[in-house]
Image: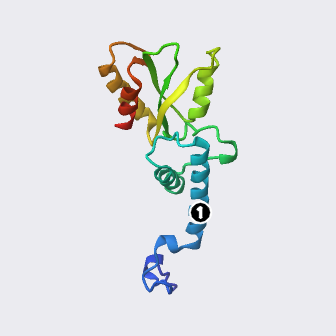
Amino acid sequence: MNAQIKLEEMINPKTGLPYYYKDNKDHKGKYRKAKATAIKLAKILQGTHGMETDKEFISIITHDILYNGLVINIDNWDGFDAEKTKLGFVYAVTNPAWPDKIKIGRTENPQRRVAQLQTGDPHKAYSMVYCKFFTDCHMAEHQAHEVAASRSPTQNGEWFTLAKYEAINIIKDL
């Protein structure tokens, strides 16, 4: 009879305690790669991920890579794969041509979204006011639209008559 010992039943000679799954060399390698990818993504986004700190964003992305099957090709990052994940950002965008209007939407890639909006503006004046990362950006956007609609005297699709700080607070409070 060949008895297999479970990892948690083995004693780690360095600590004298039962092995923890993170003591596994294979897990350590996967963790390092996931964290490195998350750090690179945080640098690409340059603080526009909407988390309080890069550390918080890196922690969430690392966890999603390790345990939720998130795959990111950081060398050619073009946003999250919308068909495979609900991960993304809810953002607020303004344009000085409409000073009392603000657009609240969702995207897998904030930089690309602003660039897409710029194609319709000869002055390239769209500006990302705020964006925040969500594990379910679809639901977060829906909630933001509901709150914004209740506070805005007018609405045209994703465009609301709100002050910048109001839109930022709506997204922050989700």
Residue drawn at 48 percent across, 71 percent down: 21
| Residue at which label 1 appears | 32
Q: Residue at x 58, y 57 (%)?
A: 34
Mark 1 is on which residue type?
Arg
User: The residue tagged with tag 1: helix, strand or loop?
Assistant: helix
For the residue pair 168 and 66, the one nearer the viewer reads as 168
Q: Is residue 171 above or below residue 98?
A: below
Q: Position of residue 41 (x, y in %)?
A: 59, 47
Q: Work out whether 162 lies above or below 72.
A: above
Q: Position of residue 13 (x, y in %)?
A: 50, 87
Report whether residue 174 is seen.
no
Visual colour scheme: rainbow
Q: Residue pushed farthest left?
A: 150
Relative depth, front residue between 165 and 66:
165
Residue 149 rendering spot, x and y as whole percentages: 34, 20
Vertical order, 10 against 123 (above or below)? below
- The residue under the point 56% across, 67% down is 27
**x and y, in percent, of residue 25 in the image:** 58, 72
Residue sitting at x 58%, y 28%: 113
Q: Is residue 119 left or right of residue 131?
A: right
Q: Quadrant of the C terminus?
A: top left
